[in-house]
Amino acid sequence: MTDDYLNPRKSQVCQAIVAQGLLADCDSLSMVDIDGLRNTVRRLTRTFPDHFLHTFAVKSNLYVPILEVIGSEGMGAEVASPGEFELAKKAEIPFPNIVFDGPVKKTDEILQALDLGIAINIDNFQEFEIVADYFRNQTSTSIVGFRINPQIGAGSVALSSTATLTSKFGVGLQDPGVREQLLDLYQTHNFLNALHVHVGSVGSPLSLMTEGAEAILSLAREINDRVGNQQVRTIDIGGGLSVNFESDDDSPTFEDYASALQASSPELFDGSYKVITEFGRAIVAKNAFTIARIAYTKTMGGRPIALCHAGGHNLMRTIFQPEDWAKRVTALNSHGQVKSGTKVPQDVAGPLCFSGDIIAHERPLPELVPGDLVFVHDTGAYMFTNHFYYNAKPYDPVFGFESQGEEFRFIRFKAGQTLENLTSMFTKD
């Protein structure tokens, strides 16, 4: 891991954070690169043809200011709960550009989505009955189809794989009788006009993702042949593009994915279908970071340990799955400059009262001292946005930043949580 490297933009913004006193009233905060976010979305949209609708997986980062930036660049939203839907609404994402996923949708949520023309990916046959009952009495402009589990296997991260034989998501295409049941339902219900697949998230190789797309394209052709016209007009290929956490390099790129997809499924690129994507982590992960102050240092069993104010409450996945979510950590001095000096294997530990609250294990870094800072890279997805209330630790401030000439403009996305606000969450109403 390239812990000792900070690119010029990150280096400059760290020094600006310190100089402008953003860490004066807190000991940990997260920063979102607004310019980087815009550039990432623009790179995505340039890579694929215009008949692709790219939606952002809201679960990966819930902050409305981020959704507003993404929406202003033409992306839609993929939501999996009423809360995520309300956040997309606050960001003024148009209803036709919203996709409603999730394995446990309530009846009223389904009916609302159909009333508003929001796309629905049906998770199971019982959920289908709710949708079918709606269409017996009225119509909808919604794109509607089944989520298909092609049951083609797992990626390298088991908990992020959704195309295994027994995944909880979607309808298992290889289970006995299911393919024929789907063909019959599409033939008898013309409101079914789409198919959806999502084989997994980080750790899913391009070959697995393209195999999933091939599987539902084959099913779409079979349905349309059975029906006698192109009833399936939309293919939702999900998201799940992996992110490289080892360095600043993007790998795989959107271009890599598009090339692999075009080689295996050219129909997705010739305009035969409207195509929907649901990228989340690939959009925002590398466009944010978390910075925290070192409070204390100690040596235990001969190993230096630096205790800081970031940890399980704002970096939960890294803490609980360090082998899958290891993060680069760069040592900075109190002025926000990269530290030099002899590297010493040391733990960077968080403030929570359990032994696993370790951001980095035996990481070779210039020896940290109280007052130094640690820069945790690539925390834009599933990190500070998914706060963990262990020890009743308040959430930290979140800022966006963008270039303004030679300077940076900082925009507060969220103030740090007050103790009064926190305790009210756990107080009897």
Image (cartoon, helix red, strand yellow):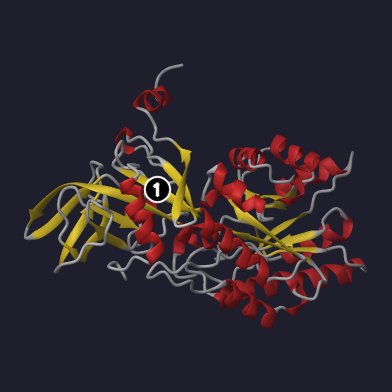
Tell me the quadrant of the picture where the N terminus can be found. bottom left
For this view, does 19 lie left or right of residue 262?
left
Q: Is residue 385 visible?
A: no
Tag 1 secondary structure: strand
Q: Is residue 246 left or right of residue 197?
A: left
Residue 12, image x, y percentages: 37, 58
Q: Where's residue 199, x and y in %?
A: 58, 65
Q: Nearer the viewer, residue 316 or 341?
A: 341
Q: Is residue 245 something one can see in this rendering?
A: yes
Residue 206, position in %: x, y? 56, 75
Residue at position x 78%, y 41% from top?
Answer: 116
Q: Amino acid at mark 1?
A: Ser
Residue located at (66% from left, 63% from top): 197
Residue at x-position 40% and y-position 20%: 427
User: Residue sitting at 34 percent across and 26 percent down?
Assistant: 419
Query: Looking at the picture, how far across and down is residue 412, in whole percent?
Result: 47, 40
In the picture as drawn, the residue positioned furthest to the top comes out as 429
Q: Which residue is mark 1?
A: 30
Q: Is 119 on the left or on the right of 404, as rendered?
A: right
Whether residue 374 sits left or right of residue 397 in the image: it is: left
* Mark 1 surroundings within 10 Å by alpha-carbon count, few (fewer than 14), some (14 through 19), many (20 or more): many
Furthest-left residue in this view: 302
